[in-house]
Amino acid sequence: MKKIGLTGGIGSGKSTVARILLAMGYPVYFSDDRSKQLTQTHPGIRKGLTELIGEQIYKDNQLDRSALALAIFSDDALRVKVNQIIHPIVRDDFDNWINEQTNPLVFNEAAILFETGASERFDAMVLVTAPQELRIQRVMKRDFCSREEVVNRINHQWTDVQKIQLADVVIVNDDVQPLIKQVEHMLTLLA
């Protein structure tokens, strides 16, 4: 079984590529979605976040995502500490998930696989890219946030130039080049 990392900056369309793969019958672990679930349910994450930030990070028994995002995107050291709490638990969850899979190719969709060094755990890395202005527009529309907020998030991730050098396959999601054709080509390269 080959483990494939599927990554890309915010708004690049990696989730769109992941949904295409799912529709084609390939198992995809959505790290961001599982991370959100685990921050609500995993006692180790809850304990770590409340010890680091304070009880107020959970309101009405729910993680205050807005407060957490505001805190970590304005404090690099805090972001690293939060990632050190959440990422190992998500990695363990992925390892448990992968043990249940039977397909020869499995995918892990996550935003910051290169930045965290998690890319080393995969047999190959697929990078989804898109022009920055298109990414900004997509995220503003999707998350109902300001241009400034999106640019701030983009600035806290590696650039496509940095990631392309490390990727085994690059898919360009620019709303011009056919996406399914690129996904099919990527699958032939990875098979």
Image: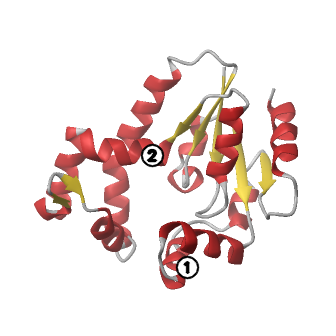
| Cα gap from disc 1 to disc 2, whole angstroms | 22 Å
Which residue is painted at 53% across and 44% down in the image?
Answer: 118
Tag of residue 5: none
Q: Position of residue 180 (x, y in %)?
A: 82, 44
- Which residue is situated farthest in the left direction here? 55
Location of residue 93 (image quadrant) = top left
Q: Position of residue 80 (x, y in %)?
A: 37, 60
Q: Let me know if residue 123 appears in the view.
A: no
Disc nearest the viewer among 1 and 2: 2
Q: Where is residue 61 in the image (x, y as percent from the top left)?
A: 16, 51
Q: Identity of the amino acid at label 1?
A: Val
Q: Name the residue under label 2.
A: 33
Helix, strand, or loop for circle 2?
helix
- For badge 2, the amino acid type reads Asp
Q: Where is the N terminus found, in terms of image quarters?
A: top right
Q: Which residue is drawn at 50% across and 52% down?
A: 116
Q: Quadrant of residue 41?
A: top left
Label at residue 151: 1
SS under mark 1: helix
